[in-house]
Image (spheres, grey):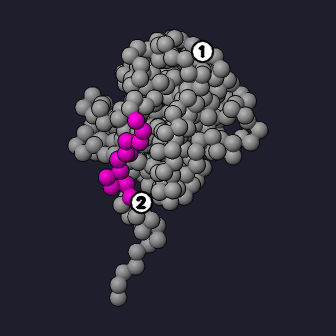
Amino acid sequence: MRARTAPGLVAVILSLALLAGCTVPRPPGESPLRYRDQVFTDYEVTRDLQYGSAPDQETGSPVALRLDVYRPRGDTEKKRPALIWVHGGGYSAGDKASGVATDIGPTFAKLGYVVASINYRLISSGCGGSNIRPECAIAAFNAQHDAQAAVRWLRANAARYRIDPARIAMGGESAGAITATLAGLRPDDPGDSGNPGFPSNIGAFVSISGGFPSGAFASAGDAPGLLFHGTADGIVPSQWSVDTAVALLNAGVPAFLQLQEGAGHVPYVQFRDLFVEQTDYFLYAFLDLAHAHGQPIGAARAFDRRLPRLREKYPHYEKPLSRLKKSYPQYTP
């Protein structure tokens, strides 16, 4: 008698098959193409803007939440996509003005983005590896709420910083990657770290050495995700990214998993070019930047020719503006 395979296992096997060789293709369009190619040679930074406030997890004292804004120097475009970057550090260390953010900010500003590198509430003892304590879970959800307050701050200040409020993404490394994942999967839990009255949804998320265990919280309405992870990561298990990508795909949400064989935790220096290129292509596709304000008509037409295949592969694929209006019909970007 032949053994039967459980339906859930079949779904996992099929999802993993879809993930194999999961590379985001280069968006079509003539060069130079804004948001895909570097179109600016310089950028400017505005530092230490307060975007919210929330109680410290350990003392209850108010914590001022601050961010740095990177913008392309000399840009005249009035509605630009935004990328929020969240630093790592085990929820106890790290800063918005150090590490991966100091490369992502200038790089994506030169593509034409507005990039916000944020700080968030930290705790005194780090989380990672076997050091998983209840306060670490609380810290992760607090960071999620702080990051969502930054999303709302960008929407509240969209005119001032010339941001397209329908095209906001989030990314991060390590603890910041877990935070970005949670923001992509839990828009219905916005927290109260500041800027009420604006949606907390993001259009896409990027995770370097993050994800979330067991694919928890993934559902059909979530943001598409791009997840990178070293298979020899001893701080955050690579299985977290696998679980998250599989759960998103099973929900019909676009997800791309790229495993770096033998790499450890946040191998950004080693794989920097891959991470930047794939993030560039992923955000262009899933923030629908071919149709962004100011783009040439040829770029939109080229992207539209790929839409039928995209919708066939991902049944719940929606452009970010459509998904935003569905969640917040009263909101007008």
Prevailing SS of the magenta stretch: loop
Name which quarter of the figure residue 267 lies in. top left
Q: Earlier in the sequence, mark 1 or mark 2?
A: 2
Q: Position of residue 285 (x, y in %)?
A: 47, 42
Q: Residue at x 42, y 19 (%)?
A: 40
Q: Position of residue 190 (x, y in %)?
A: 64, 35
Residue highlighted by disc 1: 50
According to the picture, the residue beneath numbered tag 2 turns out to be: 15
| SS for dot 2 | helix
Residue lying farthest to the right in this orientation: 330
State the extent of the magenta-drawn residues as a range: 18-30
Q: Amino acid at mark 2?
A: Ser
Residue furthest to the front: 298
x, y percentage for residue 51? 61, 19
Establish if 257 lies above or below 176: below
Residue 23: within the magenta? yes
| Residue in the foreground of this view, choosing between 218 and 138 | 218
